[in-house]
Amino acid sequence: MASITFEHVWKRFGDVIAVQDLDIFIEDQEFLVFVGPSGCGKSTSLRMLAGLDEITEGTIKIGDRVVNDVPPKDRNIAMVFQSYALYPHMSVYDNMAFGLKLRKTPKQEIDKRVKEAGSLLGIENLLDRKPKQLSGGQRQRVALGRAIVRDPAVFLMDEPLSNLDAKLRVQTRSEISKLHQRLATTFIYVTHDQTEAMTMGSRICVLKDGIMMQIDTPQGLYDYPDNVFVAGFIGSPAMNFFDVTMVEQDGDLYVDSGTFRLKLPPEKAQAAKPYAGQEVVCGVRPEDIHDREFTPPGIRAEPMTAEVDVTELMGNEVFVYLLTGKKQFIARVDPRTKAKVGKEMDVVFNMENVHLFDRKTEDVIR
């Protein structure tokens, strides 16, 4: 068991800065997810922790021990990669036992650990098979089992579900979450998939261009994004953004896009008052835009009318792509909606959940 500390860690490849001043403390037994687009520095951060990439500047600790110059094999970590990297000529049992044999672990202890890990992952009946006789999901479990038998202080996972189909990804995702609960060990997980991050992590670290944009619980990121990037990255479908002007009228504050004007509730107006007369970015999640006919009770609703461009029936909900002027935005509405392509539709915005961002800095206005 171990906590992890990144203290002002930098990684440069020549003139390229891959990770910039990463400063995080990860609690013992926490499940932290690094998430962000390709090239944001998430895998590099993991590799520096594993000892596979050297740190340019800063300090990494596992527990109280500085590991900057400690070889990977002595860091008491186990890593699961996107590639299963199984030995094709070895059985599942031998693949899982191989690392322990190299460490000259007693045969009886190896047998005990492999069988326990096999049982934990539901592959105890596959131990005699070769990797080519397994499905993708079973191979991924073997790769997990190989990590588990080492009984590491920290599990590092670099996009381990990328090779699986959609249904298997959902299943394996829940299995990894259960595994974390059973093992009560620190997990650090890298993904570009925000759905994986939201459903698995106890905290999420959002990276962009090597810079940590925000770190918080999944719900904290969803409800209180610090900037436009985090707001747009977390949530599916993504948040809608409108360029608006803050207009003050008769003591009230409105967001005005030119094609619609919506009144801000008092608490949001208070925070946004210094921006009166200025242009800002207004963010609204699709789930906070409703068909006016099916407005949920108890919300602070502001109406507007838009043209229906596309509809996507999802069964329990409908995604409606709407046009206001030349701007397209998406609403996630009740399946009873009568929305018709090419027709106008009355919708309401839940103004309590609207987010406002500074146009220049892209930081949230609170």
Image (cartoon, rainbow, N blue to C red):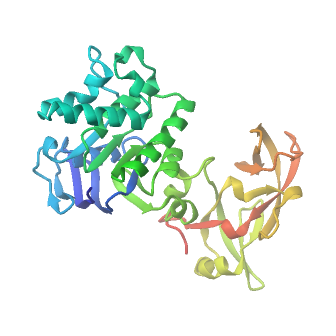
Name the image quarter holding the N terminus.
Answer: bottom left
Residue 172, placed above or below residue 197: above
Q: Is residue 174 left or right of residue 81?
A: right
Residue 253, picture quadrant: bottom right
Q: Can residue 144 be seen here?
A: no
Q: Nearer the viewer, residue 279 or 108?
A: 108
- Image point (34%, 36%), residue name: 117
Q: Is residue 160 left or right of residue 51?
A: right
Q: Can residue 278 be seen here?
A: yes
Q: Nearer the viewer, residue 138 or 302?
A: 138
Numbered marks: total = 0
Where does residue 62 sit, x and y in percent of width and height?
21, 56
Where does residue 301 sit, x and y in percent of width and height?
79, 67
Q: Is residue 199 left or right of residue 352?
A: left
Residue 182, placed above or below residue 87: below
- Residue that extends furthest to the bottom in the rendered view of this protein: 251
Q: Is residue 195 left or right of residue 270?
A: left
- Residue that extends furthest to the front in the rendered view of this protein: 108
Residue 109, picture quadrant: top left
Residue 41, placed above or below residue 346: above
Q: Nearer the viewer, residue 304 or 128?
A: 128
Where does residue 267 sit, x and y in percent of width and height?
66, 80
Where does residue 100 sit, x and y in percent of width and height?
19, 33
Q: Nearer the viewer, residue 295 or 125?
A: 125
- Image point (45%, 57%), residue name: 202
- Image point (72%, 76%), residue name: 265
Name the image quarter holding the C terminus.
Answer: bottom right
- Image point (25%, 31%), residue name: 111
Residue 310, picture quadrant: top right
